[in-house]
Image (cartoon, rainbow, N blue to C red):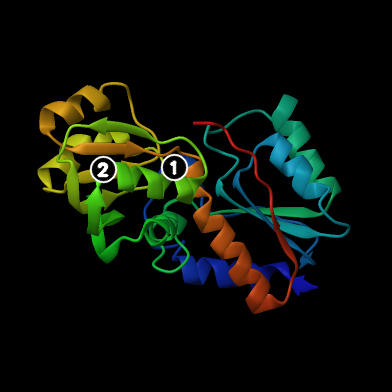
Amino acid sequence: MVALNELVAFLDGHLGIATIPDYPGALNGLQLANGGEVGRIVTAVDASLPVVAAAAGAAEGPGLLVVHHGMFWQGVQPVRGAFYRKLKTAMDAGLAIYSAHLPLDVHPEWGNNVGLARAIGLREVVPFLEWQGLAVGLRGVWEGTREELKQRLLEAVGGPVQVSAGGPERISSVGLVTGGAGSEVVRVAAAGVDAFVSGEGPHWSFPLAEELEINVFLAGHYATETFGVKALGAELARHFGLPWDFVDRPTGL
């Protein structure tokens, strides 16, 4: 067993929870406590009721569920219905819940961005695309054709990749922001990269990419954001000597 406050202090410190800006609904950090001890780590992308139920039943004893998208994206809500069942399921099982959104996206070692960048072979990466003073993505060198980059993404995320082929056939520079950054196509095109990789975007981002002459690759919001929680689970297991598991609950989006 490891003390919950020891795990939380490790996560808060290494992820920069207190200093990295985020959307109000993210509520980064410990969202639900337990009795104070943790015997196992479970990670997932979303703190949905099915995920919490799976994590609660993953093993006997108290645990810590670490997610990318936490429980409060909808803001203040009454504790009833599915929200009540989610809290009760976690509390009955002694399952604490910790969430890290942008702090996990941008982490230089365990982040979603760097995980996907490594998986596709992006080189010479530097911070990219500022939001509230925070670089939320990476930019780097990638040499190959449009089809080759699509294939690398397919292998990396294990799912479909949509392509708006507005830019050059041969690609030498890529901007990458995991998750739902497809609406940033104008700012990305202005940065001068040949291709933009993200998870999902609005319909208008595709025809606009053609007009702006940039390739846009959308590899799934969920699929591009499994890298961070998996890396974090492995690190917590290594550092604290706890067993860990990943609950895979794809959204298809």
Cα–Cα span, label 1 and label 2: 37 Å
Work out whether residue 131 can be spotted.
no
Earlier in the chain: of badge 1 and badge 2, it is 1
Q: Residue at x 22, y 57 (%)?
A: 143
Q: Residue at x 44, y 62 (%)?
A: 18
Q: Residue at x 44, y 69 (%)?
A: 109
Can you give x and y, in whole percent of width and height, for residue 217 in the image?
Answer: 32, 38
147 left or right, relative to 240: left
213 left or right, relative to 28: left
Based on the displayed image, in which of its 4 quarters is residue 5 positioned? bottom right
Tag on residue 146?
A: 2
Q: Amino acid at mark 1?
A: Pro
Tag on residue 15?
A: none
- Relative to the observer, which residue lies in front, 61 or 182? 182
34 left or right, relative to 220: right
Residue 213 vertical position relative to residue 20 in the rendered view, above or below: above
Q: Residue at x 62, y 63 (%)?
A: 233
Q: Nearer the viewer, mark 1 or mark 2?
A: 2
Number of residues whose C-alpha sits closer than 10 Å to that of mark 2, classed few (under 14), some (14–19) or many (20 or more):
many
Residue 182 vertical position relative to residue 204 in the rendered view, above or below: below
Based on the displayed image, in which of its 4 quarters is residue 10 positioned? bottom right
Q: Amino acid at mark 2?
A: Arg
Can you give x and y, in whole percent of width and height, for residue 248 in the image?
Answer: 65, 45
The residue pinned by badge 1 equals: 24
Work out whether residue 210 can be spotted.
yes
| Label 2 SS | helix
| Label 1 SS | helix
Can you give x and y, in whole percent of width and height, for residue 125 in the image?
Answer: 26, 64
Can you give x and y, in whole percent of width and height, for residue 188 in the image?
Answer: 19, 43
Is the residue under label 2 in contact with that under label 1 (CB below 8 Å)?
no
- How many marks can you see? 2
